[in-house]
Image (tube, rainbow, N blue to C red):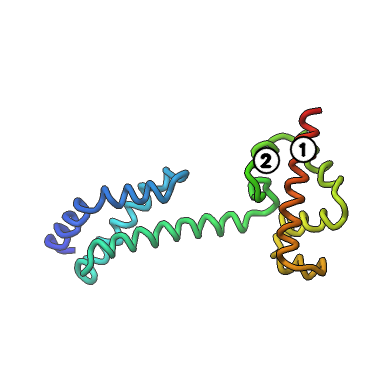
Amino acid sequence: MTEAENKKCAELWAEYESDLRNICKAKMRGYEAEIDDIIAEVYLALCNHTSKEGPPIYEKAWLYGTLKNLINQNFRDKYKKEENMAGFSIDQIDLPYQHDFVNDIVDNSAIEKLNTAISELDKKEQTVIKSVYFDDKRMKEIALKLGTTESAVKQKRYRICNKLRRILNEKQKK
C-alpha cells in the first residue's frame, strides 16, 4: 500500500469509525466481546480494498455494507456452531407465550415437574409437543401426521403450552 493509500484509509477511518462502532454495538448487543474484532475486520477490508482497487467510490455505503456483511457472517457462524452441537439443550426451547419458563427450569426438580406435566397430557398433545420442540418438525409435517390443518396444530400448540404452564404453576404452589 502506498503512502497516499494509507493516508486515505486513515482519513476514511477517522471519519466513519465512531459511527460504525455505534452501529456494531447496537447490532451485537449481548456479544460485546466481538465488537472490536468486527470493527478491526472492517478496517482491514477497507485497507485491502484500497490497496487493490483504490478507495471505494461510495465510501460510506461500502463501509456500512461491509460492516453489515461481517455482522451477518458472525451470526451465521454462531448459528452453524449451535446447529452442529451434539445433544439437546433446554436453552433451545422457545415457547410461544409471555412467560419464559426456560429460566424456571434450571434444576432437576423443575425438569422432573415438566416431565410429569407432559406425561399428564393426552397422546395427541404429547405428539405435538415432541414434534415441535424435540424433533423440530414443521407445522405442515405435524398437521399431515395428525390429519388436520396447520392452523389447528398451531392453535393446539399454543393451548398445550398454556396448559403446561397452568400445570406447572399448580405444582409450584404445592
Q: From where the camera sits, is residue 6 visible?
A: yes
Give the position of the C terminus as an image quadrant.
top right
Height in image: 98 above or below 108?
Answer: below
Question: Which SS class for mark 2?
Answer: loop
- What amino acid type should be assigned to the residue bearing mark 1? Leu
Amino acid, disc 2: Phe
* Left or right: 86 in relation to 52: right
Q: Residue furthest left?
A: 4
Residue underneath mark 2: 101
Q: Nearer the viewer, residue 87 or 120?
A: 120
The CA distance from mark 2 to mark 1 is 9 Å
Against 62, residue 30 (above or below) is above
First in sequence, mark 2 or 1: give its number: 2
Q: Residue at x 28, y 64 (%)?
A: 61
The correct choice, above or below, for 130 with respect to 56 in the image is: above
Circle 2 Cα neighbour tier, 10 Å, few/some/many (<14 / 14–19 / ≥20): some
Q: Quadrant of residue 149?
A: bottom right
Kindly indicate whether the residue at mark 1 contacts the one at mark 2 (C-beta within 8 angstroms).
yes
The number of discs equals 2
Q: Which residue is mark 1?
A: 168
The crowd level at tag 1 (other Cα within 10 Å; few <14, some 14-19, many 20+) is some
Instruction: Please give the name of the residue rendered at 12% of the width and 60% of the height, measured from the top-left corner.
Output: 3
- Residue 138 % position (x, y): 69, 65
Judged left or right of residue 17, residue 155 is right
Q: Measured from the top left, where is residue 101 in percent x and y?
A: 67, 40
Q: Is residue 51 visible?
A: no
